[in-house]
Amino acid sequence: MSAPTGPGQQEDMTAYLARIADALERLSPPPPPAPDAHAADAFVWQPGDGQLVPIAAVNRVPIDLLQGVESQQRQLHDNTKRFADGLPANNALLWGARGTGKSSLVKAVHAAINEDHPGALALVEIHREDIPTLPTLLGHLKAMERRFVLFCDDLSFDGQDAAYKSLKAVLEGGVEGRPENVVFYATSNRRHLMPRDMIENERGTAINPSEAVEEKVSLSDRFGLWLGFHNTDQKTYLAMIRGYVAAYEIPAEEEEWKPQAIEWSVTRGARSGRVAWQFIQDLAGRLGVPLSG
């Protein structure tokens, strides 16, 4: 394609520029389609292309198999049910020991609400490293005619990480605040979303120790519902396994699997829902029983 060089050339500058614009438009990729809020009941946010990727089958445990978290289950279910009904509801922070069922409870409650009211809620997972893109995601969700539980698993902040400011602003502190059709649930091993040694270090080195920590610690205050999860005792641990054995019809008597389950927890130095499920996977595998659900 050559540019016009004189008045005698048939193609004028306007037509020439139009041809260049058309060529560039053909070379550029088409814009991504708008996310479909009803494509599934669960999505994962991919900020690179601004898409909500639908998840056909969510990795979850049925809510009636969760043991030792009855109080947390009741509170989170009630909060989520109110939100699904269009009533005021709180953001929720599920914090505590590893493997105690925090993320399992979020997914199980979402499934239970949708089982009673099909399609009532969509679960959208945002990864920790994508928190700075949260305002963009909320912009998408706000424009959709559906209610969303926005979920971040294993949320925490370290060192000079400033991503917490994005989350703090959109939860309640920004000009627009949280959209009415979105509630934010997060799990963390840390009650204040930052390690204790980091809190103590800032207190010890700052000119005004209380103000140095206040900004970061106050992020957890944006969650109106705090649910604590603690280490599992042996009675609850065995009850978890008993429930799994019955639910998946594993052909093993309690006197057979019980000592194995205790040994399994001892070798791992912990008792938790995660350890119980890992034992069930081992037991079912050895006995040739497939697990589903």
Image: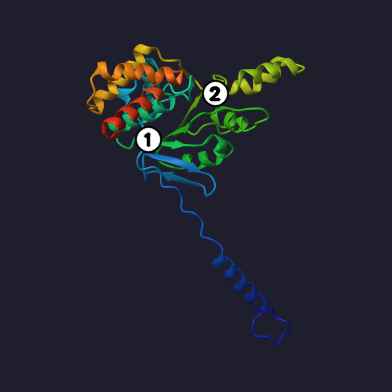
Dot 1: element: loop
Q: Is residue 271 visible?
A: no
- Where is residue 19, by image quadrant? bottom right
Residue 127 vs residue 16, the one in the foreground: 127
The amino acid on which the numbered mark 2 sits, given as a three-letter code, is Arg
| Figure check: 227 above or below 288 | above
**Of the residues shown, which amino acid type is indicated by label 1?**
Asn
- Quadrant housing the C terminus: top left
Question: Mark 1 = which residue?
Answer: 59
Q: Residue at x 49, y 34 (%)?
A: 179
- Foreground mark, 2 or 1, reads 1
Where, quadrant-wise, is the N terminus in this rendering? bottom right
Q: Residues within 10 Å of mark 1 (few under 14, many from 20)?
A: few
Horizontally, residue 44 falls left or right of residue 19, namely left
**Residue lying at the far right of the rendered structure:** 207
Residue receiving disc 2: 222
